[in-house]
C-alpha cells in the first residue's frame, strides 16, 4: 500500500551520512591544494599521486550528498503544502547563496587572482577586485559562485521535485516502480548499468562544469540521485535490500577502487571505447553508496543525541565558510615553507576550527543566522519581521550570546597561537615569548596579530556578558559593572598590543590584559548570593590560586632560578593557557545556568523588573 503522506519519523542515519559527507568534502578540498588539477590555490608541495588518491571519495561523495538531500526534502513535505515547501527552500537556500556570492566567494577569487594573475594585494587591491568582479566586464562572465554551485543545484532540483510532487500520486507511482524494479540483486545491477551508460555516453562530451545550464552529465547523475532519494525515503523494502547487500556493495567498491586507480594511471585505459573504465567507475560509485546507506540504516537509524544535533546544525555554516577559510590559510601559511605533512595538518585544523568558530559566532546573532543557512531562533519565517528577529526569543538570550562569544574567544586565541607557532620555522617554545610570533622575525605575523586582535575584541564583548549574567542571576549591579570593565580593559590590552608588535614599547599596553587575573575573585564576589553553583565557585577559586602561584614564580618572588632563560617560554605557555582557558569554562557554565533559569516557571513582573534589564 502506498504511504498516504511523506514519512515523518526522523532518520538519524541520513543525518550522520550528510555530516560525514560534508566532513569528507573539507578533507577533499585540502587534498586539492596538493593535487595536480587546476584549483584556486596550491601548496608549494604538489604530488602526482593525488590524481589517483582523490578517487577514494570522488566517484560517490557528491552523488551520495544529492541523494540524502533529496531524502531530506521529502521529509519536509510532511504536513506541508507544495507552496510551503517551496517557500521554506527559498528562505533556507537563497539568502546564503546571495551572501556567499557577494561576501565569501570574492575573497577566494581575489586570493586566486593574486596567486595566478599578479593582482595587487592590500585593501586597495581587494576593492579594485570587487569592482572588477561586479563591474560590467566581470558580470558579463557571470557571477562566480565557486563551491556554492551545490546550493544552486539543490535549489533547482528542489523546484523540479516539488513540481513532480504537485502531480497527485506521481511520487508514489515512481516510488512503487523503483521498489519493484530494484528488488533483490537488481538493487545493484540496474543502477550500476545506468551510471555506466551516462559515464560512457555523456561524460566524454560534457564533463562536469558545475554550470547549471551546461552540465548535462552532472544533471543525469545528480538530479537522478536527488529524485531517487526523494522517492525512496519511506520504501522499507528498498532499505532492507540495502542492508542485505551492504557487504556486497562494500566488496564491489573495494575491488573497483584499485582497478579505477590503475585505469587513471595507465595510458591505455580508454581502450574498447572507454566502456571498461565507465563500468568500473559505476561499480565503485554505486557499490560504496549502497554500503554506506546499508550500514547506516542498519546501525544508525536511532542513534541521535546532542552531538549529532550540533553537527547537523553546524554543517551548512561549515560548508559555506570552509573554502574561503582554506584558501586564505593556504595563502598565509605557504610562505613559511613547512614540510608537507605539517602544512596539511595546519590546513585541516585551521579550516575545521575556523569554520566551527564562525558557526559558534553566527548562530548567536539572530539577524545573520539566515545568511548562514540557519533557521531563525524563534522559528518564524525570515525576513518577514526583521524587528522581531532582533529581539530575544526568550529571557537572557542576548546575555547568553555574549557568553557564547566568551566560550569561543579562548578557543580562537589558543588555535591562533598554535597555528602561528607551526608557521614559524625554528620557533623555540622553551626560550621564546609568544609576542615574537607577531614580530618582524615571524614569517606570517598577520596570522598571530590578526587572530589575537579578534580574540581581544571578543573578550571585551564576553565581559559584557559576564557582567549582565551576574546581574541577572544575583542582582549584584556593582559587581556586574566592575567585572565588565575588567574584561573590556583586558580585551583592549590584547587588541591594542597587536597594533604595535614587539619590540615597539607601545606593545606593553598588553599589561591591561593582566587585570583579568582578578576576574575569578570578582566573579566569586558577584556570585556570593547563589548557593546552587558550588562547583563553579570552586573552579574560580582554584583558577585564581593557580594564576597567583604562576605570577609569584615568574616574577621570581620565591624560588629564584626556577624560571630562567632556558625554560621561560614553557612557563609563559602554561600561564597563557590558564589565563584565557578559564574564561571559556566560566562562560559556558554561566550560559547553562541562565538557560535553566530562563526555562523555569514564569516569574512575577516585579521580580523580572528587579533582576532583568534590557541590553
Image (cartoon, helix red, strand yellow):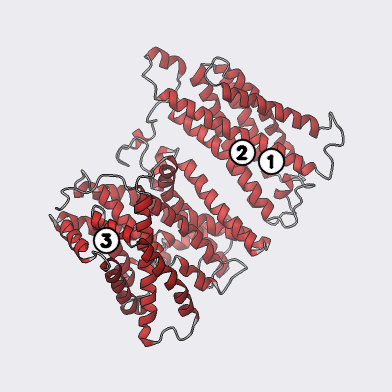
CA gap between label 2 and label 1 equals 10 Å
User: Earlier along the polypeptide chain: callout 3 or callout 2?
Assistant: 3
Which element carries disc 2, helix, strand or loop?
helix
Q: Are marks 2 and 1 in contact (CB under 8 Å)?
A: yes
Determine crowd level at label 2: few under 14, some 14-19, many 20+ residues with C-alpha closer than 10 A: many
Question: Residue 228, labelled with which disc?
Answer: 3
Please name whichever residue, 285 or 613, is drawn nearer the observer in this view of the structure.
285
Camera-near label (2 vs 1) is 2
Determine crowd level at label 3: few under 14, some 14-19, many 20+ residues with C-alpha closer than 10 A: some
User: Earlier along the polypeptide chain: callout 1 or callout 3?
Assistant: 3
Q: Are marks 1 and 3 in contact (CB under 8 Å)?
A: no
Q: Is residue 267 above or below residue 496?
A: below
Question: Residue 195, labelled with which disc?
Answer: none
Camera-near label (3 vs 2) is 3
Question: Residue 456, labelled with which disc?
Answer: 2
Residue 541 location in percent, x, y?
65, 24
Amino acid at each position: 500500500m502506498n504511504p498516504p503522506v511523506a514519512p515523518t519519523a526522523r532518520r538519524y542515519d541520513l543525518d550522520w551520512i550528510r555530516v560525514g559527507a560534508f566532513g569528507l568534502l573539507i578533507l577533499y578540498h585540502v587534498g586539492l591544494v596538493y593535487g595536480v588539477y587546476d584549483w584556486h590555490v596550491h601548496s608549494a608541495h604538489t604530488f602526482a599521486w593525488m590524481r589517483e588518491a582523490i578517487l577514494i571519495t570522488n566517484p560517490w561523495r557528491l552523488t551520495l550528498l544529492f541523494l540524502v538531500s533529496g531524502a531530506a526534502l521529502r521529509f519536509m513535505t510532511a504536513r506541508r503544502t507544495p507552496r510551503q515547501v517551496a517557500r521554506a527552500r527559498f528562505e533556507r537556500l537563497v539568502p546564503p547563496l546571495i551572501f556567499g556570492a557577494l561576501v565569501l566567494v570574492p575573497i577566494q577569487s581575489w586570493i586566486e587572482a593574486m596567486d595566478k594573475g599578479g593582482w595587487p594585494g592590500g585593501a586597495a587591491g581587494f576593492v579594485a577586485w570587487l569592482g572588477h568582479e561586479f563591474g560590467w566586464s566581470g558580470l558579463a562572465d557571470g557571477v562566480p559562485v565557486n563551491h556554492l554551485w551545490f546550493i544552486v543545484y539543490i535549489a533547482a532540483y528542489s523546484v523540479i521535485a516539488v513540481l513532480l510532487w504537485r502531480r497527485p500520486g506521481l511520487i508514489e507511482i515512481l516510488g512503487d516502480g523503483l521498489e519493484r524494479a530494484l528488488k533483490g540483486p537488481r538493487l545493484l545491477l540496474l543502477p550500476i548499468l545506468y551510471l555506466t551508460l551516462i559515464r560512457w555516453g555523456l561524460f566524454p562530451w560534457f564533463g562536469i562544469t558545475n554550470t547549471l545550464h551546461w552540465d548535462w552529465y552532472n544533471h543525469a547523475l545528480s538530479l537522478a540521485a536527488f529524485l531517487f532519494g526523494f522517492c525512496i525515503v519511506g520504501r522499507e523494502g528498498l532499505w532492507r535490500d540495502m542492508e542485505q547487500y551492504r557487504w556486497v556493495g562494500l566488496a564491489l567498491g573495494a575491488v573497483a577502487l584499485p582497478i579505477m586507480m590503475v585505469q587513471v594511471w595507465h595510458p591505455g585505459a580508454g581502450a574498447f571505447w572507454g566502456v571498461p573504465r565507465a563500468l568500473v567507475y559505476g561499480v565503485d560509485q554505486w557499490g560504496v553508496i549502497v554500503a554506506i546507506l546499508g550500514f547506516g540504516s542498519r546501525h544508525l537509524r536511532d542513534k541521535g543525541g546532542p552531538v549529532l544535533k550540533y553537527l547537523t546544525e553546524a554543517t551548512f555554516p561549515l560548508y559555506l565558510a570552509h573554502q574561503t577559510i582554506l584558501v586564505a590559510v593556504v595563502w598565509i601559511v605557504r610562505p613559511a615553507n613547512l614540510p608537507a605533512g605539517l602544512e596539511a595538518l595546519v590546513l585541516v585544523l585551521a579550516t575545521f576550527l575556523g569554520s566551527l568558530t564562525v558557526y559558534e559566532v553566527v548562530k548567536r546573532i539572530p539577524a545573520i543566522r539566515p545568511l548562514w543557512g540557519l533557521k531563525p531562533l524563534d522559528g518564524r519565517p525570515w525576513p518577514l519581521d526583521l524587528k522581531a528577529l532582533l529581539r530575544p526569543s526568550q529571557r537572557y538570550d542576548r546575555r547568553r550570546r555574549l557568553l557564547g562569544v566568551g566560550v569561543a574567544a579562548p578557543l580562537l586565541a589558543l588555535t591562533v597561537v598554535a597555528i602561528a607557532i607551526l608557521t614559524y620555522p625554528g620557533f623555540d617554545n622553551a626560550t621564546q615569548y609568544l609576542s615574537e610570533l607577531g614580530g618582524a622575525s615571524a614569517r606570517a605575523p598577520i596570522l598571530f596579530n590578526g587572530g589575537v586582535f579578534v580574540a581581544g575584541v571578543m573578550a571585551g564583548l564576553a565581559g559584557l556578558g559576564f557582567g549582565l549574567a551576574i546581574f541577572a542571576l544575583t542582582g549584584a549591579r556593582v559587581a556586574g559593572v566592575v567585572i565588565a570593565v575588567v574584561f573590556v580593559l583586558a580585551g583592549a590590552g590584547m587588541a591594542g598590543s597587536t597594533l604595535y608588535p614587539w619590540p615597539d614599547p607601545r606593545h606593553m599596553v598588553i599589561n591591561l590584559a593582566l587585570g583579568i587575573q582578578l576576574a575569578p575573585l570578582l566573579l566569586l564576589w558577584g556570585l556570593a548570593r547563589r548557593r546552587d553553583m558550588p562547583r563553579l565557585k570552586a573552579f574560580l577559586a582554584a583558577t585564581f590560586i593557580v594564576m597567583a602561584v604562576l605570577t609569584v614564580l615568574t616574577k621570581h618572588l620565591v624560588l629564584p632560578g626556577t624560571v630562567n632563560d632556558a625554560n621561560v617560554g614553557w612557563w609563559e605557555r602554561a600561564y597563557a593557557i590558564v589565563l584565557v582557558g578559564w574564561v571559556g569554562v566560566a562562560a559556558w557554565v554561566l550560559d547553562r545556568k541562565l538557560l535553566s533559569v530562563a526555562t523555569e516557571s514564569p516569574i512575577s513582573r516585579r521580580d523580572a523588573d528587579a533582576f532583568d534589564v534590557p541590553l
